Amino acid sequence: MTRFVPGGTRHYSDGVSMTWFTLLRTASRPAAPGLLLAVLAGVGAAGAAVGLMATSAWLISRAALHPPVLHLMVAIVAVRAFGIGRGVFRYAERLAGHDAALRVLGRLRVRLFDRLAALAPAGTAGFRGADLAQRLAADVDAVLDMLVRVVLPYTVAAVVGLGSVLLVGALSPIAGAALAFGLLAVAVGVPLLQSAAARRADGRLAPLRGDLATATVDLLHGLPDLIAYGAAPAQLARLAEADTRLRRAEQRSTAAAGASAAVTALATGLSLIAGLAAGAVAVRSGALDGELLAVIVLTPLAVYESIAGLPVAAQRFAAARASLTRLAEILGTPDPVTSPAHPEPVASSTPVISVDGVSASWVRGRTAVHDVSFELPAGARVALVGPSGSGKSTIAALLVRFLDPTAGRITLDGTDLRRLDPDEVRRVVGYLPEDAYLFDTTISANLRIGRPDATEADLRAALARARLLDWAETLPDGLETFVGEHGMALSGGQRRRLALARALLADFRVLILDEPTEHLDDETAVALTRDLLAAAGDRSVLLITHRTDVAAQVDTVIDLAAPAAVPVGALSHRL
Ligand SMILES: Nc1ncnc2c1ncn2[C@@H]1O[C@H](COP(=O)(O)OP(=O)(O)OP(=O)(O)O)[C@@H](O)[C@H]1O
C-alpha cells in the first residue's frame, strides 16, 4: 500500500514484507546527499590524519639530515594544512552525518506511527504492547547507529585504507602488502571472528530488551491483582529471568568485543613489524630512500587509528540489524483492511447500513462472528445484545472498518464498505468502545479529541447530554481538571460518561455505543439511555448492551444468541 509520509516527500510501500536492508535503503534515500557529504568529509578527515603522519614522518627524517630550511617549507605548510584540515573535516563529518541520520530517524518514526495508525487495532493484535513501545522508542534509534556508526566508518575506512595501501605500496610493495593484510584482518577478519562468537547474543539483545519491557509493564499494571492473588513472586521471578537472559547476552557480546579489541591490537602490531622489516630490507638494498622508511612505518599507525572502531562497528551492525528487522516486521505487517485505490465518496447524510450474512475473525482460523444479518435504517435505534464473546464488539469493529468480513458484506447506502476509504467511513460512523481511552490531561482536552475546534459552550453541552456537567461544575478547576492516567482520577461511571460526551461532540451520523451504561446504577442507566437516544436526533444509534431495561428503549433488538429476537425493522438474523 502506498502511503504519504507527513514531513517528507517520499512514498513508501508499507504493508509489504520487507527486509532490514530494504527498510534502511528506503528510509535513507531522502538523506543521501547529506550522507554523501558526511562520507566525503570523513574521507577528508581520515586522509588528512594519514597525510599528517606521512608528511611529518618524512619531515622529521629529512630535518635530521640538516637540509636548507627552504627545502622543508612545502612539507611544513602541508603538516599545518593537514593538522587544521583534520579537525575541520572531522567536525563537518559529525555535523553532516548526524544531521542526515537524525532526519532519517525522524521520518522513520513518523512512518512507523503512520503504519501503526493504519494497523490498529486488528493489525497490532500480534504484537505485545510493551514490546511495541520498545520497538518505537529504542529499536528505531538503530537507524542512527547503522548510518553513523556502521555505514559511515566502513565507507570511510574502505576509501582511506585503499589510498594508504597504494601510497605505502608505491614506496615498498612488501610494506604495502603487509598493510593491506593488517587492514583486512582488522576490518574483515576480526568482525567475522567476533560475529561468530557473539552473533546470536548481539542479535538477541533487542528482542530480549522487548521481553524485559513486557515483563516490567505486566508487573506494574497487574501489581494490585498479583498481590491480591499472591502471584507477585512468580511474576518477579519471570522478570528476573528476563533480566538474567538479557545480562548474559550482554556479557557474551561485551566479552566478544574485548577479545576482538585484543586481536585488533595484535594484528596492527604484527603488520607494523612486517612493514618495518620490509622497509629496512628495502633501505639496505638501496631500493628505498632512508628518509622514507619513517613514512612506511608511521603512516600505517594513522591508518590503523582511523579503522580502530570497525570491530565495534561490526558489533553494532549485528544489534542494529536485529532492531531494524523488528521495525521491518511492523512496516511489513499487512493491512487488516484494504483501502481502494479510487474510493467512492461517502455521503455526509445519515446512511442506511446493511449487514448481510457477515462472518469475521480477528485471528485466522478463529471465527468471531458467523453469518450475521441485520439492517440499521437511517435514524433508527437498534440494540445489539448477546452473551459475552458472541461477537457484539466485533460487529462494531466491522462497521467502522477496523476489520473486514471474511464472508458476506456490509453496505453503507448500498455501497460495499470495502469500496470506501476507512477514514471516511469513520467520519460518518463513530464507535465508542467499552474501554474508551482517556488521556492523562484535562477534561476539556479529552473532549476536544472529538472535535478540536469545539467552543467552551459545545463542551458544556456535550457534558450536559452525558449527564456529567453538574459534577464537572463542582470541581475547583472545572473543565480544566486533570483526569489522571487512563482517567484514574474519575470513577468508572464518570469515565464512561466523559468518553460518551466526547463521542457526542464528534457528531457522527451513526453512533455505535458499546455498553455505554456500564458502571452506572439502574436508574441513571435508563435515564442516560433515554437522554442519549433523544440527543441523537435524526442520527442512527447502534446500542451494544447486555441490559434488558436499556435494550427495551430502542426500535429493534438484534440478539446474537437467539434467532427469535425482536426484529422490528431488521432484515433477518441468522446465527
Ligand atoms: N482484538 C481482538 N483480537 C483477537 N480476538 C478478538 C479481539 N476482539 C475480540 N476477539 C475475539 O472475538 C470473539 C468475539 O469477541 P467480542 O468482543 O466481539 O464479543 P462481545 O460479544 O463483544 O463480548 P463482551 O460482551 O464480553 O464484550 C471472542 O472470541 C474474542 O476472543
Image: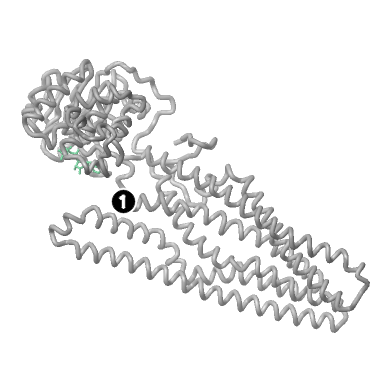
Work out whether residue 344 can be spotted: yes
Q: Quadrant of residue 346?
A: top left
| Crowd around label 1: few <14 · some 14–19 · many ≥20 (10 Å) | few
Quadrant position of the N terminus in the picture: top left
Relative image position of residue 135 (x, y in whole percent): 40, 52
Q: Name the residue rendered at 28%, 18% in the picture.
A: 413
**Circle 1: element type:** loop
| Residue 11 screen position, x and y as percent | 51, 36
Residue type indicated by callout 1? Arg
**Is residue 80 rendered to the left or right of residue 301?**
right
Residue appearing at x 38%, y 41% in the figure: 116
* 548 on left or right of 219: left
Of residue 63 and residue 43, the one placed in the foreground of this image is 63
Q: Nearer the viewer, residue 164 or 195?
A: 164
Q: Is 224 situated left or right of 421 in this image?
A: left
Residue at label 1? 128
Taking the spot 44% from the left edge, 62% from the top edge, the residue there is: 203
Residue 559 in the image: state x and y as whole percent.
Answer: 11, 30
Residue 370 at least partly seen: no
- Quadrant of the rendered structure where residue 226 is? bottom left
Location of the C terminus by quadrant is top left
